[in-house]
Image: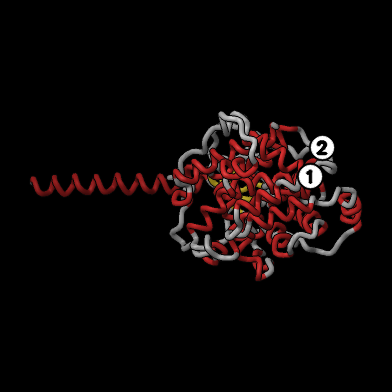
Amino acid sequence: MAVALTVAFLCSIVFIIVLFFLFKIGSKKKGKSVSYQSKYDKYDEDPFASVPHPPKTDNQEQEHIRIVDYLEISRPSPERPITSEDAALIDMIRQSPELPSAIMELSHLLRDPDTSIKKIVQLVSTDPVLSSKVLRVVNSAAFCTQKITSLQHAVVILGFNELWILVNQLLAQSALQSLASLPHAEIKSLWRHAAATATCAKHVLFHAGNIGNDIGPTVITCSLLHDVGKFLLRGLSSEKPDVDSDEPCAKISVVKEDEFYGIDHCRMAYLLTTYWKLPEILCTTISYHHHPSFANWQDIPSHAKVPAALVALSDMVANAAGYWDAEPCTMQINQEMLESIGLDKDWSLNKLLTKDLIQDLRDTEKLIDTATTL
């Protein structure tokens, strides 16, 4: 009798456990919804549930990050033939000033791991605008409590990575300010996300075993400039695509932009970067940085597949860490693309969102806060 009761008790326990798991599976299926040909899961219902909540910032409340799946939808090529609408945009872009040669040269110099501080200081000193900006940032309360008058001392305090972000921010800003008139808060938000993506790229490269490769500087540069097309797009009109507060990320940014502006920021980036005569690999990688999240990811030119995948993942990590731009979401990435950069099926964002990365992101945010305020 006692044995029968014990068996019955154990069977009841097993039955309850099975019911519990069936309920959990059913809940997850119900949690997935389809909207505007895209599907998404709440952050705490997807495989990345163990990732800590994004940090709260001045302008953003703590949110669950939505992982949006567009893997069955195709995107047009950002390198498609020029249209009449594109021609009008190109005419407008041609009104922008040439990129400052000293800042362009310094951007290349900082990508060389063998560059010396002496070379950097010599080049910075040839551009009064850049010299002034570096000294103003370093002498801000956020960076230093003592008066710094030496450029060499300023470069040491900033460090190569921070100086590189600052230089590229100035580089793009100098070319865009005559084209796009945006509110300060929006400019800051865009640069905050861009700089965070570049910071995440360094950690992604290390995690994927690419930090020492020649591809590293390209990926970090493209990560910083990946959304450069958004500056010009948003400056075209005082109106913007609506953000649905009840259902954020129902449409991802490139889809909204196509419908609202007739062009997305990837295509706009292609027009901008090719006009600026940036190296071809930079133009291509920046233009295709969202393609790893779409069905036609194989359309990415072969030489840009790996850097585009690395930029897409860096963008995803920055969003997951709370450094998103307009909405708290990010896009799923094709698994074959992830495998191409050395990540297997068991990879997780939790492994990438380390304490070191979060600290680096906070330091980067401090730099952007200071640089966009001064």
Q: Nearer the viewer, mark 2 or mark 1?
A: 1
Badge 1 crowding class, 10 Å Cα cut-off, few under 14, some 14 to 19, many 20 or more, is some
Residue 292 x %, y %: 62, 60
Residue 181 located left or right of residue 342? right
- Residue denoted by label 1: 174
Q: Under tag 1, what secondary structure? A: helix
Residue 253 x %, y %: 70, 46
Q: Is residue 49 visible?
A: no
Residue at 46% across, 57% down: 347
Q: Under tag 2, what secondary structure? A: loop
Q: Residue 235, labelled with which disc?
A: none
Q: Is residue 41 visible?
A: yes
- The image quadrant of residue 156 is top right
- The image quadrant of residue 284 is bottom right
Whichever of callouts 2 and 1 sits on the residue coming sooner in the sequence is 1
The chosen color scheme is secondary structure
Residue 238 located left or right of residue 184? right
Residue at 62% across, 31% down: 140
Residue at 80% across, 47% down: 175
Q: Amino acid at mark 1?
A: Ser
- Residue denoted by label 2: 181
- In the image shown, does 135 or 163 lie closer to the viewer? 135
Residue 303 x %, y %: 66, 70
Q: Estimate the spatial distance between the alpha carbons at disc 2 and disc 1, rounded to whole Å.
A: 12 Å
The reply to whether callout 2 and callout 1 are in contact (CB within 8 Å) is: no
